Each structure stands twice: as C-alpha cells, then as structure tokens.
C-alpha cells in the first residue's frame, strides 16, 4: 500500500465514523432521549459533581481535583480505545458521541475516586484501591449493564478491576506529590 492509498483509506474510515456518529445521534434523538435510562445517565453526570461541590475537603480540593482530572484523562483514553475496538459500548448517552460516555468516565468514576482519596487519607491505599476497583468493576459496571447504560462485548469485569486498581494507585500517588505549591513570581 502506498502513502496515497493509506490516505484514501483514512478518508474512507473517517466517512464511516461520521456515518456511525450520525446513527448514534438519530438513535438518541429518536428513541433514547428522555427515556428513564437517559435521565439516570444525566443524573450520573450532574449529581456526583454537586455532591463533590458540597462535601469536598476545601483545604485540599485543588490537589484532589487534579488527581480526579488525571483519572478522567486516563480513563477516557482507555475508554475510547475500548469502544473503538468493540470491547464494550454505551448504548444510552446524554450527549450522542459514539466513543465517549460522559456520565461514567467523566463524572461518576473521578468523583468516586476523589471521595476515596479524601476520606480516611491515611488508610492503606492498596486496600482502598481494591475496594475502588471492586466497586467499579463488579458492582458499578454490572448495574450499568442491567439498565442498558453499559454493554460488555468482548471484555471481562476482572480486566476493569485491575485497571481501576492501577488508576487508583497512580492517582493516589499523584495526589501525594509535594510539588503542589503556589505559583509565585521571582
């Protein structure tokens, strides 16, 4: 395959992606919008952040929030890859974008992580990571699957369990860095 052939194939793939996204928009706008599942997804997008705003530790909220942002970036990268390779899907979405689930990866998961980091901060991080991974993989994802917000295609919950443990431990480590000092002019 020549370079030009590769560019043409990328153009064809881009066209198929646009068609796929159009199917998502039509499905959501014509069948799923305002269903009870859609309202739950909307609540999962908003309620965790409201709770975070109310119950966050105000003295360390920037540090903990930055760890939550790290979790969002890592999980969104992995999530986009998983959806793109057909490992799982999100049938009902608040915002109709094929590869992104704002409700789970950009709201529920990072806020849960931030609460885990904030509550009993001196508690064993490995135990908290296992609890976080277990809750997310073996309780959260199956519950989301039962109400059609998550569809496992070619994936095992155990994979998610270990990935969530790693994400938690990395976010925990990041939140404990001493480099969070105020920016000052010299």
Image (cartoon, helix red, strand yellow):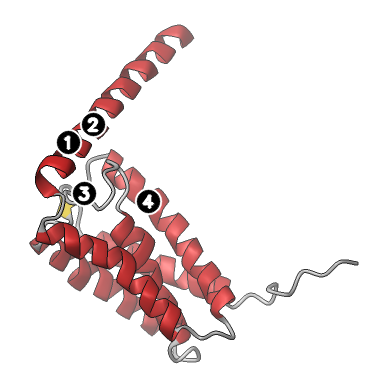
Residue 178 x, y percent position in the rendering: 68, 77
What residue sits 17% from the left and 57% below the top? 38
Q: Tag 4's secondary structure?
A: helix
Q: Residues within 10 Å of mark 1 (few under 14, many from 20)?
A: some
Which label was assigned to residue 78? Answer: 4
Near-viewer residue (158 or 84): 84
Q: Which residue is mark 2?
A: 22
Between disc 2 and disc 4, the foreground one is 2
Point out the tag, 2 or 3, that comes first from the N-terminus.
2
Residue 142 x, y percent position in the rendering: 14, 65
Q: Residues within 10 Å of mark 4 (few under 14, many from 20)?
A: some
Residue 7 x, y percent position in the rendering: 43, 14
Q: Are marks 1 and 3 in contact (CB under 8 Å)?
A: no
Q: Are marks 2 and 1 in contact (CB under 8 Å)?
A: yes
Is residue 72 visible from the viewing direction of this image? yes
Q: CA distance from mark 2 to mark 1?
A: 6 Å
What residue sits 51% from the left and 86% below the top? 57
Point out the tag, 1 or 3, that comes first from the N-terminus.
1
């Amino acid at each position: 395959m020549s370079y030009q052939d590769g560019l043409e194939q990328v153009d064809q793939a881009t066209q198929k992606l646009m068609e796929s996204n159009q199917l998502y928009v039509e499905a959501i706008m014509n069948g799923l919008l305002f269903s009870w599942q859609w309202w739950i997804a909307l609540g999962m997008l908003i309620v965790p952040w409201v709770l975070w705003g109310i119950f966050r530790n105000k003295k360390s909220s920037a540090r903990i929030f930055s760890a939550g942002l790290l979790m969002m970036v890592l999980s969104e990268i992995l999530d986009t890859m998983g959806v793109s390779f057909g490992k799982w899907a999100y049938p009902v979405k608040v915002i109709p974008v094929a590869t992104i689930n704002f409700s789970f990866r950009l709201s529920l998961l990072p806020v849960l992580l931030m609460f885990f980091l904030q509550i009993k901060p001196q508690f064993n991080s490995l135990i908290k990571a296992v609890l976080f991974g277990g809750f997310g993989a073996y309780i959260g994802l199956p519950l989301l699957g039962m109400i059609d917000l998550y569809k496992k295609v070619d994936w095992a919950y155990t994979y998610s369990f270990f990935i969530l443990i790693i994400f938690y431990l990395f976010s925990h480590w990041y939140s404990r860095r001493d480099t969070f000092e105020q920016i000052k002019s010299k």
